[in-house]
Image: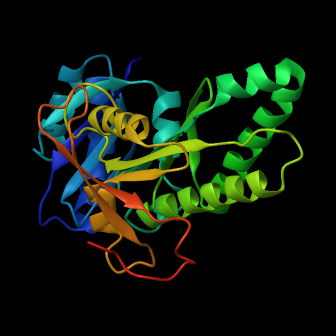
Amino acid sequence: MPLFMDRHDVRDATAEAVAAAHQQDLRVQAHHTCKTLTYWFDEKRGTAFCLIEAPTAAAVHAMHREAHGLIPNMIIEVQPSTVESFLGRITDAASSATQPIREAGFRALMFTDMANSTQITNVLGDTKAQVVFTKHHETVRQALLAYEGREVDRAGDGFLICFASVSHAVMCAVTMQRAFHSYNSSRTLPIDIHVRIGLGAGEPLADGDDLFGSAVNLTARICATAAPSQVLAARVVRDLCSGKSFTFRRYGEVHLKGFPDPVELYEVDWAGQEGAGSAAF
């Protein structure tokens, strides 16, 4: 059967109330040929997201209507592998048998792009260039392991990565750039590695008909705007790191392809801060 994710605006709801609604879905799901797999609940933002196998989106509507009357604001069909890549699971968390799920669907997103990959191949040739590319991939993935990043996709010389923690995403970007800087300072091959990094954040079904669609597109455009060895972040990333040990400098408002209004961006000072500092506005 197709797999659907839906969004509910449940402002002022408690985790216990959402867990009870999930149990009510389980009780009536067979009446509608549905199978409710799991949910995510963000108490701060007042949003819940359900993952359901169902013959149609209409069946999901009908199941929720009979179970508890909380009709979703949006339903889209999704792929299991995509959901797991972004959100980490497609079934209930192990702890859900004894306590309500308090895991938000909100994710920080990162795009990376190796800025000079063509130059590396031209200068070094295929064999030596592969050594540099391997170093690049290893550096990115080591940082992901350290900060619980999840590799969603890799296209060419870049990565799409997601994080449950916005601060982990920023620290991961800082760690990557410092690692590449260290490599460039001590390298034995005659060319540096320079990587662009863009940071964004959002919810699974903020708008559109794709999982994290607008947030992914925005983050990709931010990455493309960054200069080699630069980290640029959307304002939401800066705002969610308020009080954390990062230094953000206002980059300015930028017109990004596909977005009608200018987007305010901030540069992360990865070289100057040592894990302590304050946001610079």
**x, y (%) of residue 94?**
55, 58
Relative to residue 41, is residue 125 depicted above or below? Answer: above
Query: Does residue 90 appear anywhere in the picture?
Result: no
Residue at image point 53% right, 64% down? 270
**x, y (%) of residue 10?**
14, 56
Q: Quadrant of residue 28?
A: top left
46 or 224: which is nearer to us?
Answer: 224
205 or 39: which is nearer to us?
Answer: 205
**x, y (%) of residue 178?**
65, 61
Q: How many marks?
A: 0
Relative to residue 192, is residue 164 depicted above or below? Answer: below
- Direction from residue 195 to residue 189 in the image, left or right: right
Query: Does residue 6 appear anywhere in the picture?
Result: yes
Q: Quadrant of the C terminus?
A: bottom left
Relative to residue 12, is residue 180 depicted above or below? Answer: above
Residue at image point 73% right, 49% down? 139
- Direction from residue 93 to residue 114 in the image, left or right: right
Residue at image point 66% right, 22% down? 118
**x, y (%) of residue 215?**
31, 40
47 or 225: which is nearer to us?
Answer: 225
Q: Quadrant of the N terminus?
A: top left
Residue at image point 20% right, 61% down? 45
- Direction from residue 147 to residue 277 in the image, left or right: left
